[in-house]
Image (tube, helix red, strand yellow):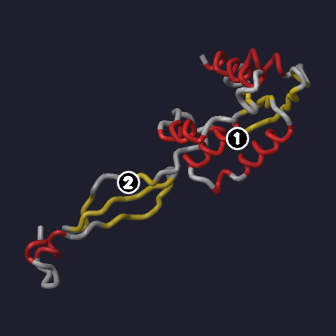
Amino acid sequence: MKETQQWEQLQDTLNGEQNFCIIEERKAPILYAVLLQIKKIDGIPVTHRNGKEGPEVIVGNGYYVQKYLELLSDRPKYTRADFQVQMGLLLGYSFEDCVEFAKNPPDCDCEKCGGPNDRIELGPVEYEGTRPYQKATYQGAAYGTLYHPDPELIKHSPGIQNWSKP
């Protein structure tokens, strides 16, 4: 399946429907092996690179290859969704298609898809006495604690109107 998708992306690039394409050895070993032997296809340069997920071939002119490499190096500046939109625009997709893709991204955490999900995840509700709280994590690491109002303190607070007490 991935091999077929990579062949289609190459065809779209050669037909001018996409600015460039990235063919990864791990996703399309046959196509990668073929492109490894080629310097240009129909006048379009073929660039070889060792990415974080392994070897890849980039088919596209030098401008797009350079912008792709710059985008990868600037990844920490973007949220995952923003990165996916920027990558899609660079590849040549419409802004609307890029936003739609970023709303429902593939279950892939490779560098080209934007890396691991960068949302803050909240754990289950726990209690410190009667005060509820949740532990927060960001990219799997501890990020802090979200404390909720203590319902018992609110019930007995003189500064709170009767109509707003739980």
Residue pictured at 71% horizontal, 29% vertical: 18
Instruction: Depth check: give the residue in front, 164 or 36.
Output: 164
The x and y percentages for residue 117 are 52, 45
As drawn, 43 above or below 86:
above
Quick one: label 1, few (<14), some, or many (20+) residues within 10 Å? some
The x and y percentages for residue 109 are 58, 38
Give the Cα distance between marks 2 and 1.
Answer: 33 Å
Q: Quadrant of the N terminus?
A: top right
Which numbered disc flags the more N-terminal residue, 2 or 1? 1
Q: How many marks?
A: 2
Quick one: label 2, few (<14), some, or many (20+) residues within 10 Å? some
As drawn, 155 above or below 67:
below
| Helix, strand or loop status at disc 1 | helix
Q: Quadrant of the C terminus?
A: bottom left
Of marks 2 and 1, the one in the foreground: 1
Residue bearing the label numbered 2:
122
Amino acid type, mark 2 = Leu
Amino acid type, mark 1 = Leu
Residue bearing the label numbered 1:
90
